[in-house]
Every structure is written in structure tokens, then in C-alpha cells.
Amino acid sequence: MSHISTDERLGVKTPEKTKIFAIVSPSLMKNNAVKLKCASGVYKNWPLGHGEYRVSGNIGPLVPTVHDAKINGFDDVLWLLDDYIKEMTILNVFVY
């Protein structure tokens, strides 16, 4: 997902016009259904962590949950926070 300025002039300032868009490429999954395991009680980002970065403090604790999902036939884990969709481990999720 990208968010860019569409102002007519280039500069460092708060933009007046912007565009947000996503490029969706389903080539990896080849239109197959994705089996997801919903994980609650295990959080992808450690408390007060840095979720925007892929560091071992965020990813390391997920290994047991992801491993359990894989050995039970799931493709990925859908991480929930208080029954709200947060994100997936390696795939993006879009709800329409």
C-alpha cells in the first residue's frame, strides 16, 4: 500500500492533494484459497515494540504459533487483538 502526494509542486511540506493505492498481485497464491489460523492471546508486536521494523524482538516469539499453524495444515496466521484483525505473518490482508 502506498500513499503519495499529487501536488503540482515538489517540495517538503504537508501535501494538499494525495492518493492512496494498493498494487495487488495474487501470483504467489495462484488463486488458491488461503487457510488461516486465528491467533489470539499471542501478539505479533511486543508491548511498546517497534512493529514497523522486522526485528527479532517482534518475530522471534511468533515462531511457536506459526510452526503450530504450519504443522496443522494452515498457510499463515491471522493475528488478532481483542477480536480485531491486526495483520498476518507474511501475507497482506485486505477486507472489502
Image (tube, rainbow, N blue to C red):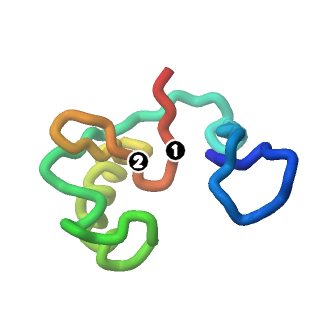
Where is residue 6, by image quadrant?
top right
Q: Is residue 31 visible?
A: yes
Residue 17 locus on image (x, y percent): 71, 39
Q: Residue at x 45, y 71 (%)?
A: 53
Q: Nearer the viewer, residue 60 or 24?
A: 24
Could you tell me which residue is drawn at 18 percent across and 55 percent down? 42
Q: Quadrant of residue 68?
A: bottom left
Where residue 39 appears, as percent x and y from the top left, is 23, 45
Residue found at the far left of this picture: 41
Q: Is there a contact, CB below 8 Å, between mark 1 and mark 2?
A: yes
Helix, strand or loop at disc 1?
Answer: loop
Dot 2: within a 10 Å radius of its alpha carbon, few (fewer than 14), some, or many (20 or more) residues? some
Where residue 58 appears, as percent x and y from the top left, is 32, 70
- The residue where tag 1 is placed is 92
Can you tell which mark lies on residue 88? 2
Residue under the image location 62 percent in, 39 percent down: 29
What is the number of the mark on residue 14?
none
Relative placement, left or right, of 89 versus 92 is: left
What element does badge 2 sit on? strand
Does residue 4 lie above or below 94 as drawn?
below
Residue type at the position of mark 2: Met
What amino acid does circle 1 point to? Asn
